[in-house]
Image (cartoon, rainbow, N blue to C red):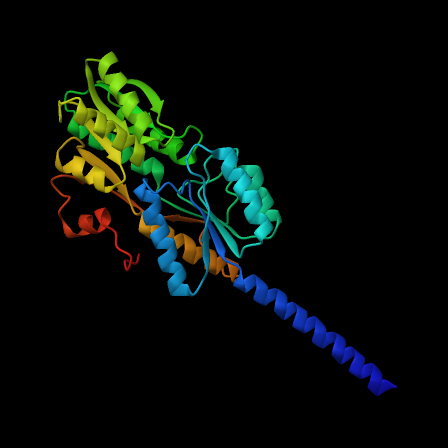
């Protein structure tokens, strides 16, 4: 009788271990889901971030699934998408939040579901994620302001073309920019205009500014589409270099405008490193390792005069086998 009881106990324990193993194996086979601000192929910044994510995934033997909205202004779409991702029970989620506040409730749902959450580029109010990997955007905004001061010794009227209202990235960059230039009473800031992540809208905004403000001296574009739209408008205005433009990021078109001196300087982030570090951190977190709560991936100001140096060429032309 005791022998049969022993065999029953052993059988039950074996089944439990087997089922636990199946569950663990299933979890290990689940992908890490990367949710960028947009999957729009025209925005090179996010394509390079994804390159970094894929490079880290290949190196660490991890599967990655990329999902995202078509535009950076579709906050509701991103929230719906995240709800679907939660149902997938992924190994971890790497998220670039479209809205600093509105994305917070769904982020709490992710954490409540036991899914490790990493934020990249744009964070969330309250610091919900276990780690935030991004440029120090306040500092980057200050760098843009300092570049504008250097470019406009006589100061004058300037306009700010931001991107998504409510995004932590846009808020911080503008705060940094304003803190740098508001100390100088020679600048008159006309307003902040929002491109909604569209270079076409940034183009229209710039064209209207050129018509409405004949004394306009400078423009700051706070992301890739905002900068690119402004640069195209200044190019079409047929007075290249007359109105100074400071921008962000480094698409191939932006680099061309920098060479033509339509853009005077660009604050360039390190998107490949951002994606690489974010995925690596997600893998570490999902395996129970401790991770840093905040990782600054840095930024550099690039002018035409220094764009051909070796370090800056690596920033302007990121490659797949690059590592932080």
Between 43 and 56, the one nearer to me in the picture: 43
**Residue 181, how many percent across, how many down?**
26, 25
Q: Can residue 17 be seen from the camera position used here?
A: yes
What is the x, y in percent for residue 14?
Answer: 70, 76
Give the image quarter of residue 252: top left
Q: Residue at x 42, y 28 (%)?
A: 165
Q: In this view, does 13 lie to the left or right of 301?
A: right
In the picture shown, does residue 270 fall above or below 23? above
Q: Which residue is drawn at 60% across and 49% down?
A: 87
Specify whether 179 is left or right of 310. right
> Is residue 182 visible to us here?
no
Q: For residue 59, which quarter of the picture? A: bottom left
Q: Which of 153 and 284 is in front in this view?
A: 284
Say above or below: 294 vs 202.
below
Q: In this view, does 112 lie to the left or right of 128?
A: right
In the rendering, at what x and y percent does residue 223 appear? 31, 35
Q: Relative to the observer, which residue lies in front, 113 or 203? A: 203
Residue 291 in the image: x percent, y percent? 46, 56
Identified at 30% across, 24% down, the residue is 160
Q: How many labels does the image show?
A: 0
Q: In this view, does 155 lie above or below 304?
A: above
Q: Quadrant of residue 218?
A: top left
**Is 280 drawn above or below residue 252 in the view shown?**
below
Q: Image quadrant for the C terminus?
A: bottom left
| Quarter occupied by the N terminus | bottom right
Residue furthest to the right in view is 1
């Amino acid at each position: 009788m005791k022998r049969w009881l022993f065999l029953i106990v052993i059988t039950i324990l074996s089944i439990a271990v087997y089922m636990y193993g199946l569950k663990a194996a299933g979890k290990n086979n689940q992908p890490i889901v990367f949710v960028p601000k947009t999957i729009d192929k025209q925005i090179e910044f996010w394509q390079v971030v994804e390159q970094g994510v894929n490079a880290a995934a290949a190196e660490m033997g991890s599967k990655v699934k990329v999902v995202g909205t078509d535009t950076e202004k579709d906050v509701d779409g991103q929230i719906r998408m995240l709800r679907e991702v939660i149902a997938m029970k992924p190994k971890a989620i790497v998220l670039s939040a479209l809205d600093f506040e509105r994305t917070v409730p769904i982020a709490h749902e992710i954490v409540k579901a036991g899914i490790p959450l990493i934020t990249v580029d744009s964070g969330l109010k309250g610091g919900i994620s276990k780690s935030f990997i991004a440029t120090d955007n306040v500092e980057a905004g200050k760098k843009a302001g300092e570049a504008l001061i250097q470019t406009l010794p006589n100061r004058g009227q300037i306009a700010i073309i931001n991107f998504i209202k409510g995004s932590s990235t846009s808020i911080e960059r503008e705060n940094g920019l304003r803190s740098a230039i508001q100390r100088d009473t020679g600048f008159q800031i006309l307003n902040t205009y929002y491109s909604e992540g569209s270079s076409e809208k940034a183009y229209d905004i710039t064209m209207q500014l050129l018509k409405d403000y004949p004394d306009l001296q400078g423009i700051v574009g706070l992301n890739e589409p905002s900068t690119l739209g402004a640069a195209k408008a200044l190019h079409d205005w047929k007075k290249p270099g007359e109105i100074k433009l400071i921008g962000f990021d480094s698409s191939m078109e932006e680099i061309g405008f920098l060479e033509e001196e339509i853009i005077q300087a660009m604050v360039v982030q390190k998107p490949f490193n951002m994606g690489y570090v974010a995925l690596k951190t997600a893998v570490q977190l999902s395996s129970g390792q401790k991770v840093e709560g905040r990782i600054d991936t840095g930024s550099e100001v690039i002018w035409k005069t220094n764009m051909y140096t070796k370090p800056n060429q690596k920033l302007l032309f990121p490659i797949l086998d690059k590592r932080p």
